[in-house]
Structures are given as structure tokens and as C-alpha cells.
Image (spheres, grey):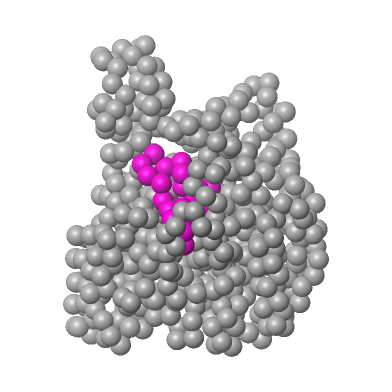
């Protein structure tokens, strides 16, 4: 087995510092592996090989010269294609941005560059992050590395598959209604959606601005903490970003403290509709957490049942407004092959024609559906009946969480009602697809932090991660698809959910 298969951020750093390997060797190995194996998976939309190898060499030279490096130096990361890296293509998996190159770095990218992390490339996603399976990409379908006949989840499916498929050590995704956590659950990796405002959204292509957050996907919870720590912080370019002083517990959780946390189990989340394998995996996870000495308590989140309906009004409203900037004039040039529809010479009616044609041809069906829904719920006469009402429900959902957090410190729930579904299984029925996010959406509406952790953690007792063995048959049923459980924290409670997750993994690896 190649060494890169078991690497975590932590073990990569240790190996690099103790000179077990060079950065160049590992980065080169990753590209060789990606070039051979990503043909089957389809996790990446573009690769940044030349730049990455150059950076790797620079780090190795620095190490040889005695320079000190932090724990992200040289770490190969995959970045979701809606996050800007200056000079590289950024399409958000939309044909309308097929030839768009980013003019500047997103703040998270700037921060990771300062930490000397290396970007392997940009990952596939549902177009503009609208979807739960990565099947809405304008370019390709990403397969689940655990079973090539199934979806990796979405919309950050390429990022999750790149890690599960041993094609990156860590990744960034974005989460508006579950897009980090659901693919993390389906691919057996860790995915963290931070508190709204903790991570700058500057340079993230906006989907629904009041819900969007960037966050890490990694093999272990400890790695998620490292990556989150590197990207968080107030940013003058994002007015919604906040300054919050996280304690040292974020990176060094203490078991004595973790044991005193109380976990709430929402009565409404464990009812019909949950696949039995998900239910039994969650029972198992709960038992492990109880064995750490953590107390569980039943709680109620009565308005959660309206979350999906409120989300599918608020989100499209913001989508319709955010996506109006993609008009074929800005962010693209020339004829349709380069983004804009060709309509002949430009005069007034031709201009309107450009908009119609470019947007009609450039956006996929799901994005168009959301733009139309959003335009409708914001139109005069319907605004109060839909949008204003949905905002009130959003408030009630937030208040449910506020009440619950007076009794408990963390909430335990499923991430998704099922395991990864088959490619094509839900594409004909958008409502079925929307249901995948029933447990993740309330968290975005409230702005809380939440993490998806694989019930069967891949961390092993030598501090490495056990690699995935791909299942290639499309027909035989797969009995061991990954399942994640979700921990929801209080506002800025990342240290609690990451801390519990870290010890959960350690029990599994016999490290506690
Ligand atoms: N799957 C949800 C949707 O389609 C969430 C998407 C996301 O989090 N970006 O809206």
C-alpha cells in the first residue's frame, strides 16, 4: 500500500518533520495516484500540479535550511470549486462559468497559503452548491469511493470523495443546508460546518448568503480541528464574520472536561423514515459516547418539522438574488463555448436576449428551478405569504435550539436518513432528494456549528487512517456503507463537538 493512503494531517506533519519523506515525494505520489484513480471517481474538476510541485520543493528547501513549519505545511488539500484561488479556474461546476478564472484568493485560501498548505486542485460539486448528490454538476458525476454505483452525497461530493478515495488529506467544502455533513456521512469522512460567521465567506461564490459557511472535510476529527483553526477569524471583507476567541481546548480537548458535557437527543429526530441501519449505527455511537461517561438526555425541537419548508423558501429567495450576477456579460466572455450565448450584435433587445439565452443555456435544471421559485416567493403579493412567513419559522427553529441548549451542551442526531443512495435513484424526484437534508438544514437556519463523524472511525491505533477499499460492483448490495452521526454545538461551541468527536475516535482506536 502506498504511504499516502493512511496519512492524516497530523501524521503527515510528523512524518515530514522527522524526515520520513519529503513534501515533493508525497505530492508527486498524490498526483500519480489521482491521475490513475480519479478516472473512476471523478472527484476533481481541475488539478494544480505544476504549482503544487513547485510549492512542495520550496517547503523541502526550507526544511533542509532549518526553517520551522506549522502543522499544515505541505499538506495536500482539495478545494471545492466554488472557492476562489487566484489565477485558477473556478466554475462552481456550472457551464456558465466554464472558462472563468478567479481574480483573487478567497480569505480561507489566503490563510491556508500563509500556512504553506498545498492545493492539489478543485473538486466537483452540485452546480453552485444546489443539490445533495453531486449529480447536478454541469460537467461530471462523482462516484462514491466506497461503492462506485452510488453517489458521494453533495453538494461538496468531490471534496468528500477526494478524501475517501485517498486523493487528498484534507479538503474544504461549503455548507448551506448540509453540503459538508451529508457527503461526509456518505463517504465515511469527517465534515464540520462552523458557526455562521466564524469563517469568512469572502471569495466563496454565494448560494444563500444567510446560510452559507465554509468548513473542513478530513479523515479524523483532530484534523478537522486543525483545518478549522487555520481558516477561522474575522475578516474585514466579510461583514458577517465575527471575532471570537476560541480557547486552547479547540486543539487540545481534555477528557475530564468532555465527560461533564450533557448530550441532548431530540425526540422528533428519531422517528419513522430513518433507515434501520442508520438507527442501529447511531445506537452504537451513542453507547460508545456513554462509555466515555457522557450523560444523554431527551430533548424536544418541535419546530424542526417545518425546517425543510422554510429552507426551500428562504434559500431559493437568496439564490435568485445572488445568481442574478451571472448574466453572460460579467464573469465570462465571447460566445457560448466561453460562457455567453451568441446572439449577434448588441442593442437593447439583443442585450435582454443575451441574458435569456445565456442563463437558459448556462444554468442546469435544478438551478433554474430554484431561481424561478425564489423569484416567485419574493414577488409582490407573495412575499408576505411565503418569504416573511418562512423567516418567522426560522426564528421559532432558532428559539427551539436556544431552549434546548439551556438543558444540554451538545445535540446528537442523524446526519442523513439513509446511507449513500444509488446514482440516478433520486434525480427524477427533487422532493425525495430534498429530504436527504432534513436533519442538517435546521442547523443552518439557526446558524449553529455541527459535525458529521463516521460511526466507524478510520483512525487506527498507530495514529494513521485505515484506507477505503473500493467496491466496484454496481449490482450486489453493499452491506457496509459509511454512516455518520451529527453533533450540534452551541454558538461557537466547536470545541465541544470537536472534543467529543476526538475522544470518540480515540475509543475506537483503543487510544483512550
Ligand atoms: N442539499 C441542500 C440543497 O440542495 C444543501 C445544499 C448546500 O448545503 N449547499 O439546497
Q: Quadrant of residue 144?
A: bottom left
Residue 150 colored in magenta in the image = yes
Residue 492, located in which quarter of the rendered image?
Answer: bottom right
Q: In the visual, does 213 lie left or right of 26?
A: right
Please give the name of the residue rendered at 33% of the width and 83% of the height, measured from the top-left corner: 15
Relative to 274, 110 lies left or right: left
Residue 73 covered by magenta stretch? no
> Where are the magenta residues, as a range?
132-155
Residue 249 appears left or right of 37: right
Please name whichever residue, 369 or 13, is drawn nearer the observer in this view of the structure.
369
Front residue of 243/214: it is: 214
Q: Position of residue 507 (x, y in %)?
A: 59, 83
Q: Residue 181's spot in the image, x, y percent?
A: 55, 58
Quarter placement of the C terminus: bottom right
Is 81 situated above or below 310? below
Left or right of 155 on screen, residue 397: right
Q: Nearer the viewer, residue 183 or 481?
A: 481
Query: What is the count of numbered marks?
Result: 0
Image point 38% across, 76% down: which residue? 7
Using the image as rendered, state which of residue 383 and residue 359 is in the foreground: 359
Image coords of residue 414 (percent x, y): 66, 60
Question: Does residue 471 lie above or below 331 as drawn?
Answer: below
> Which quadrant: the N terminus?
bottom left
Q: Position of residue 407 (x, y in %)?
A: 79, 67
The residue shown at (37%, 16%) is 353
**Main SS, magenta residues:** loop
Q: Is any part of residue 91 visible from this angle?
A: yes
Amino acid at each position: 500500500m502506498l504511504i499516502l493512503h493512511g496519512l492524516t494531517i497530523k501524521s503527515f506533519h510528523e512524518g515530514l518533520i522527522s524526515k520520513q519523506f519529503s513534501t515533493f515525494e508525497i505530492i508527486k505520489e498524490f498526483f500519480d495516484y489521482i491521475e490513475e484513480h480519479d478516472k473512476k471517481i471523478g472527484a476533481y474538476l481541475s488539478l494544480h500540479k505544476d504549482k503544487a510541485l513547485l510549492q512542495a520543493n520550496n517547503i523541502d528547501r526550507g526544511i533542509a535550511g532549518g526553517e520551522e513549519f506549522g502543522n499544515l505545511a505541505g499538506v495536500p488539500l482539495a478545494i471545492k470549486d466554488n472557492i476562489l484561488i487566484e489565477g485558477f479556474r473556478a466554475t462552481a461546476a456550472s457551464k456558465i462559468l466554464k472558462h472563468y478564472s478567479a481574480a483573487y484568493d478567497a480569505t480561507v485560501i489566503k490563510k491556508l497559503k500563509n500556512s504553506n498548505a498545498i492545493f492539489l486542485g478543485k473538486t466537483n460539486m452540485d452546480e453552485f452548491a444546489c443539490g445533495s448528490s453531486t449529480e447536478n454538476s454541469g460537467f461530471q458525476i462523482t462516484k462514491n469511493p466506497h461503492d462506485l454505483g452510488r453517489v458521494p452525497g453533495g453538494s461538496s461530493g468531490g471534496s468528500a470523495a477526494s478524501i475517501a478515495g485517498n486523493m487528498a488529506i484534507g479538503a474544504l467544502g461549503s455548507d448551506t443546508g448540509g453540503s459538508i455533513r451529508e457527503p461526509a456521512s456518505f463517504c465515511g469522512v469527517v465534515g464540520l460546518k462552523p458557526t455562521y460567521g466564524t469563517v469568512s465567506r469572502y471569495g466563496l461564490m454565494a448560494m444563500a448568503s444567510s446560510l452559507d459557511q465554509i468548513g473542513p472535510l478530513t479523515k479524523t476529527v483532530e484534523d478537522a480541528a486543525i483545518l478549522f483553526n487555520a481558516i477561522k477569524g474575522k475578516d474585514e471583507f466579510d461583514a458577517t464574520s465575527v471575532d471570537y476567541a476560541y480557547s486552547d481546548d479547540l486543539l487540545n480537548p481534555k477528557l475530564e472536561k468532555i465527560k461533564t458535557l450533557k448530550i441532548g437527543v431530540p425526540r422528533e429526530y428519531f422517528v419513522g423514515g430513518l433507515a434501520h441501519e442508520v438507527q442501529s449505527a447511531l445506537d452504537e455511537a451513542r453507547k460508545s459516547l456513554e462509555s466515555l461517561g457522557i450523560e444523554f438526555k431527551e430533548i424536544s425541537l418541535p419546530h424542526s418539522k417545518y425546517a425543510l419548508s422554510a429552507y426551500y423558501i428562504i434559500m431559493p429567495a437568496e439564490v435568485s438574488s445572488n445568481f442574478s450576477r451571472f448574466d453572460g456579460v460579467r464573469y465570462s466572455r465571447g460566445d457560448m463555448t466561453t460562457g455567453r450565448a451568441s446572439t449577434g450584435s448588441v442593442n437593447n433587445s439583443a442585450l435582454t436576449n443575451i441574458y435569456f439565452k445565456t442563463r437558459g443555456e448556462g444554468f442546469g435544471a435544478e438551478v433554474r428551478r430554484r431561481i424561478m421559485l425564489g423569484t416567485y416567493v419574493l414577488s409582490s403579493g407573495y412575499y408576505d405569504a411565503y418569504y416573511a412567513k418562512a423567516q418567522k419559522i426560522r426564528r421559532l427553529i432558532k428559539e427551539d435550539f436556544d431552549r434546548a441548549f439551556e438543558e444540554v451542551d451538545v445535540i446528537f442526531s442523524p446526519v442523513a436518513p439513509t446511507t449513500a443512495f444509488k446514482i440516478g435513484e433520486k434525480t427524477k424526484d427533487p422532493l425525495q432528494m430534498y429530504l436527504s437534508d432534513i436533519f442538517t438544514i435546521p442547523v443552518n437556519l439557526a446558524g449553529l456549528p455541527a459535525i458529521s463523524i463516521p460511526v466507524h472511525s478510520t483512525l487506527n491505533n498507530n495514529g494513521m487512517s485505515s484506507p477505503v477499499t473500493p467496491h466496484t460492483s454496481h449490482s450486489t448490495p453493499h452491506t457496509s456503507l459509511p454512516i455518520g452521526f451529527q453533533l450540534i454545538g452551541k454558538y461557537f461551541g466547536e470545541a465541544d463537538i470537536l472534543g467529543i468527536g476526538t475522544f470518540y475516535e480515540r475509543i475506537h482506536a483503543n487510544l483512550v
